[in-house]
Image: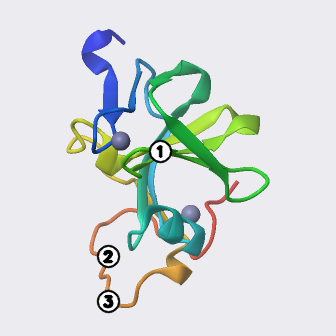
């Protein structure tokens, strides 16, 4: 992949920026309550990429929402940027923080058992009641 495929994004105020040349591992929407709380949104859509391939800068704060996951956010404007799994060398980039979100379409919905009841999922990708199959 060449630099034309570089994925770039950042927070609302512009203080935090990130980029990666890596291809996405997957693109998913998670409807679990932790993701709802962390993003302040009905669900969390993210592009998962290799952690060691992401360059990031700015005043990023981190909160461990579980033993495996910590969430990265801008300490200035509060934008949720990342969900990081160090043990898996993976980091989720919030779709809304990408400079160009349009190319990234979730290929699965997970934790649909916690989905907001008013939300109608009419796409044709897999839906999983809880986490994705191993
Ligand atoms: Zn910011
Ligand atoms: Zn989740």
Mark identifier at residue 10: none
**Residue beneath disc 1:** 75
**In this view, which residue lies farthest toward the top?**
2
Query: Left or right: where does residue 101 sit relative to residue 49?
Result: left
- Whole-percent x and y of residue 41? 38, 69
Crowding at dot 3, Cα within 10 Å, few <14 / some 14-19 / many 20+, comes out as few
Q: CA distance from mark 2 to mark 3?
A: 10 Å
Residue in view at x 32 percent, y 82 percent: 119
Which label sits in the foreground, 2 or 3?
A: 3
From mark 3 to mark 1, how far is it between C-alphas?
32 Å
For marks 3 and 1 on the same chain, the one whose residue lies earlier in the sequence: 1
Depicted 73 relative to depicted 45: above or below: above
Question: In this picture, is 2 found above or below 41?
Answer: above
- Under tag 3, what secondary structure? loop
Using the rendered view, name the quadrant where residue 58 is placed. Answer: top left
In the rendered image, the quadrant that contains the N terminus is top left
How many marks can you see?
Answer: 3
Question: Image check: 98 left or right of 81?
Answer: left
Of residues 8 and 80, which is closer to you in this image?
80
Q: Residue at x 64, y 51 (%)?
A: 63
Which corner quadrant of the image does residue 104 belong to? top left
Q: Nearer the viewer, residue 18 or 47?
A: 18
Q: Which residue position is annotated with label 3?
A: 118
* Other-residue count near label 1 (Cα within 10 Å), few / some / many at <14 / 14–19 / ≥20: some
Secondary-structure class at tag 2: loop
- Residue 117 spot, x, y in % from top left: 39, 90
Mark 1 vs mark 2, foreground winner is: 1
Please, which residue is most extreme toward the bottom here? Answer: 117
Q: Is mark 1 within 8 Å of ligand 1?
A: yes
> Which residue does the numbered mark 2 point to in the structure image?
121
Most foreground residue, 116 or 105: 116
């Amino acid at each position: 992949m060449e630099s034309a495929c570089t994925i770039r994004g950042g927070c609302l105020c512009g203080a935090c920026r990130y980029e990666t040349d890596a291809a996405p591992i997957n693109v998913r929407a998670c409807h679990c309550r932790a993701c709802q709380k962390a993003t302040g949104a009905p669900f969390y859509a993210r592009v998962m990429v290799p952690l060691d391939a992401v360059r990031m800068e700015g005043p990023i704060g981190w909160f461990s929402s579980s033993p495996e996951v910590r969430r990265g956010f801008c300490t200035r404007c509060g934008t949720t940027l990342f969900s990081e799994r160090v043990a898996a060398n993976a980091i989720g980039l919030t779709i809304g923080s990408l400079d160009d979100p349009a190319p990234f379409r979730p290929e699965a919905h997970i934790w649909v058992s916690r989905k907001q009841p008013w939300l109608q999922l009419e796409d044709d990708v897999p839906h999983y009641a809880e986490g994705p199959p191993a």
